[in-house]
Amino acid sequence: MIPVSIVTGFLGAGKSTLLRRILRDPAWADSALIVNEFGEIPLDHDLIAASEESFVSASTGCLCCVVRDDLSKTLLDLLRRREAGEVPRYARVLVETSGLADPAPILHALMTDAALGATHALQGVVTLVDALHGAATLARHPEAQRQVMLADRILVTKPDLAPAPEAAIRALNPAAPLRAAAHGAAEPGWLFAPAPRPAELPDWAAHHTVGLASIVIEREAPVPALALTLWMQGLAEHAGARLLRLKGLVALAEQPDRPAVLHAIQHMVHPLEWLERWPGEDRRSRIVLIGEGIPRHFPARLLAAIEAEVAAEAARRG
Ligand SMILES: Nc1nc2c(ncn2[C@@H]2O[C@H](COP(=O)(O)OP(=O)(O)OP(=O)(O)O)[C@@H](O)[C@H]2O)c(=O)[nH]1
């Protein structure tokens, strides 16, 4: 039986940060990671694959609704390739859900699929809650509430930025063991210990926030750092709380050989991170925004206008 653990948590809660750290630990490097993202381009896959040798399989779309069958297929296909010696003999599977996934349909698939049941054992659901945004997110987004309700273990992330929103969490899940850890420094043995599973859970249907959309921006030419900074400020001002998440790999004009990693979660713009190198041949900048009611072409047009202004200003100064 291959143990399977689900790692969930709302947009930007710190799932990739945690998993990157765990896969760097030699004791856990023999894990297969299945990453699922909301959005049309698999950025997490690039981010995790660029920093590790670990074995990653990415799928896009909402794991819980669009590709529910796909998780079963992905797990079984991975197992077949493991048996055939085509992939490393991983000892467990970690599934990183999209930030917008309701875990209930995923658990349902894992608990009811006969072929999966014969080969895989569900260990538990680990839910990450962002200390900074957690209370507001839990008040607004049904996916976030379901992630906490169905958690076997709760990890509060970003305790360096704010106190844990314990009251909001305990209102939804009074019993699951809870810990806090900054920058993914949590004990994997605690996170992934097998949890007792109720035979049946109520209400399998996915619950979703209405009206969220993802917008993708791709560009060939590197972007000046000043234009990028002004663009993120402009977006934050215009979209405010309607911008739930922004992340991207960007070629900055000042340093195009190393991609900069952008992260913003609601109002909070995290410091830029840098990858050592581009994850593949494709060196285009790619940015994904997830928001409510942001006009589809607005972010790209705003960026183009700011770039033109920055270039004109540079020309004026000679
Ligand atoms: N200050 C602080 N920042 C953190 C911590 N954990 C993660 N971050 C930052 O939060 C941002 C989002 O982290 P990710 O790990 O990409 O979050 P995610 O849950 O994978 O995001 P999605 O895949 O979009 O849902 C990044 O800029 C991280 O560096 C933490 O404990 N403290």
Image (tube, rainbow, N blue to C red):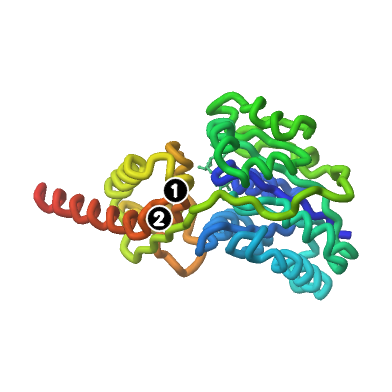
Furthest residue in direction bottom, as rendered: 84
Camera-nearest residue between 119 and 149: 149
Give the quarter of the image for residue 57.
bottom right
Q: What x and y, as percent, mark residue 254? A: 31, 52
What's the residue at 35%, 54% (across, down)?
A: 252
Query: On the picture, is 105 further left or further right than 253?
Result: right
Callout 1: SS: strand
Residue 273 seen from this side: no
Camera-nearest residue between 32 and 121: 121
On screen, residue 166 above or below 24: above
Cβ atoms at labels 2 and 1 below 8 Å apart = yes
What's the residue at 41%, 51% (across, down)?
A: 293
Query: Label 2, on which residue?
Result: 250
Is label 2 within 8 A of ligand 1 (CB to nearest ligand atom)? no
* Residue 262, disc: 1
Give the residue type at disc 1: Leu
Where is ligand 1, by quadrant? top right
Q: What x and y, as percent, mark residue 113? A: 83, 65
Query: On the picture, is 26 further left or further right than 121?
Result: left
Using the numbered discs, state the Cα–Cα distance from disc 2 to disc 1 in whole angstroms. 7 Å
Of callouts 2 and 1, which one flags the residue occurring earlier in the amino acid sequence? Answer: 2
Is label 1 within 8 A of ligand 1 (CB to nearest ligand atom)? no
What's the residue at 78%, 57% (across, down)?
A: 108
On screen, residue 257 above or below 236: below
On screen, residue 115 above or below 260: below
* Residue 298, disc: none
Give the residue type at disc 2: Val
Quadrant of the rendering where the N terminus is positioned: bottom right
Give the quarter of the image for residue 233.
top left
On screen, residue 47 above or below 165: below
Query: On the picture, is 40 further left or further right than 24?
Result: left
Q: What x and y, as percent, mark residue 168? A: 64, 29
